[in-house]
Image: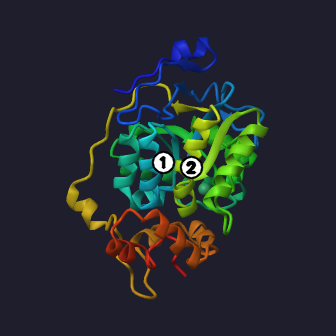
Amino acid sequence: MRRVCIVACCLIGGALPALAAPCPGNPTALGTSRTLTVDTRSFPRIGTMQYRNTLPLGDHEVVITFDDGPLPPYTDRVLDALARECVKATYFLVGTMARANPDAVRRIYNAGHTIGTHSLRHPFGLGDLGLPRIANEVDGGIALVRKAAGDPRAVAPFFRIPGLARSNQAESYLASQRLSVWSADEVADDWHRGITPSQIVRKAMSRLEAKGHRGVLLLHDIKAATAMAVPMLLKELKAKGYKVVHAVPPGERPDMVPDLPATMVAAKQGWPRVTPQKGETTGSVRAMPRPIRVAARIETRARDVRLAAALNKKKTKAQSVSAFKFGGPFSAR
Ligand SMILES: [Zn+2]
C-alpha cells in the first residue's frame, strides 16, 4: 500500500521531507524531492489565484498539475517526459475522458502520480449551475474516474472546478463532500490559441518567479503544445534550481491498479492512431466533453499538424504520416 504519515506531516506543517530516490537511467534527473500530504481538513482550498491559502511550499518548490485528460497520445507523451525525469504530478481528470481512456487512467496511477477529478463533462460555469447539477457533475466525475481506475481508493479527494469557475454554492458542496478544492498559483496559458511550447515554458517560469519562486502550476495534458513543452519545462526547472513536490492524499492507497486486458487497449487504437476519413472524428475526439471540444476547435489544423509532426519525429516516416495527418484531438471540425 502507498502509505503517508499524517502525524509527521502535521507536526511540520504538512511537509514530509524525504530523500529523493535515484532515477533509473538518468542520474541527472530533476526527480521528485519530497511528498506533501494534502489533507482536506487542513487544505480545503488551494491556490492563490483564487484563495488566500495554498500549499506550504518552500523556496523553489513546485507542484505540477495537469487538467482535462486523459487524452492519448498527448497524455502518453507527458507521462513519458515525467517518467524520464522521475517527476510525480497531480492529474485532474474529466469523467467522460476517463471513461473513454481507462487504460490511460491506469497508466497515470501506476506511474505513481496522484489522480484527482475535474467534473463529469467539464461544463464551463459550473459555479452558476443549480445544486443538483453541481452535485451531478462532481459525483458523476468521481464515479467515472474511479471506475476507469479500477479501484476507488486510487482517486484522491482533490477536485478542480472547470475553468476555475468557483461559486460559494459549488465550494460549499465540495466541502460537504470532503473534497479539497484546487485552484492554482500559476498558469502558463497553454490553452491559448496559437501558443507555442517555448511560450508555455517562459510563462510558467516567469510566473513561478513572480510568485516567490514556488507554487502549484496548472497545465493541460490534452494539448499538443503542452506535450512538447513539458520536457523543456522540466529541463528549465532543473537548470533554475527548482524541486518538484508530489502532493498526495492521506491514508492508504493501492500500490498499483490492475492493467486492462491487452485486447481492450488494442481495441482503442493507441499509438499510432488510425487516420480518420474526411468528416470523421476519432474515438477520443468524440469522447471529449463539448466545452473542451469547442475550445479545441479554436486551434488551427496546420499548427496541430506541425506540432504533432515534431512530437512524432522519432517515429518512422510511415507512422508519422498516418498517425497525425488529421488525427490530433483538435482536428474535429
Ligand atoms: Zn479544465
Bin the neighbour count of mark 1 within 10 Å (Cα to Cα): few under 14, some 14-19, many 20 and up. many
Choose the circle earlier in sequence order: 1 or 2. 1
Left or right of residue 156, residue 164 in this image: right
Q: In front here: 61 or 309?
A: 309
The quadrant of the picture occupied by the C terminus is bottom right
Q: Is residue 115 left or right of residue 203?
A: left
Instruction: Look at mark 1 in the image and give the residue it sits on.
Output: 142
Q: Is residue 130 visible?
A: no
Ligand 1 under 8 Å from disc 2 Cβ: no
The x, y position of residue 64, in whole percent, is 58, 41
How many marks can you see? 2
Can you say whether 45 is above or below 274 in the image?
above
Quadrant where ligand 1 appears: bottom right
Residue indicated by mark 2:
232
Q: Secondary structure at mark 1?
A: helix
Nearest the viewer among 288 and 26 is: 26
Could you say where residue 172 lies in the image, as x and y percent from the top left?
68, 41
57 or 102, nearer to the observer:
57
What's under tag 1, amino acid-wise?
Ile
The image position of residue 2, as x and y in percent, is: 38, 27
Whether residue 76 is situated above or below residue 19 in the rendered picture: below
Does dot 2 land on a helix, a strand or a loop? helix
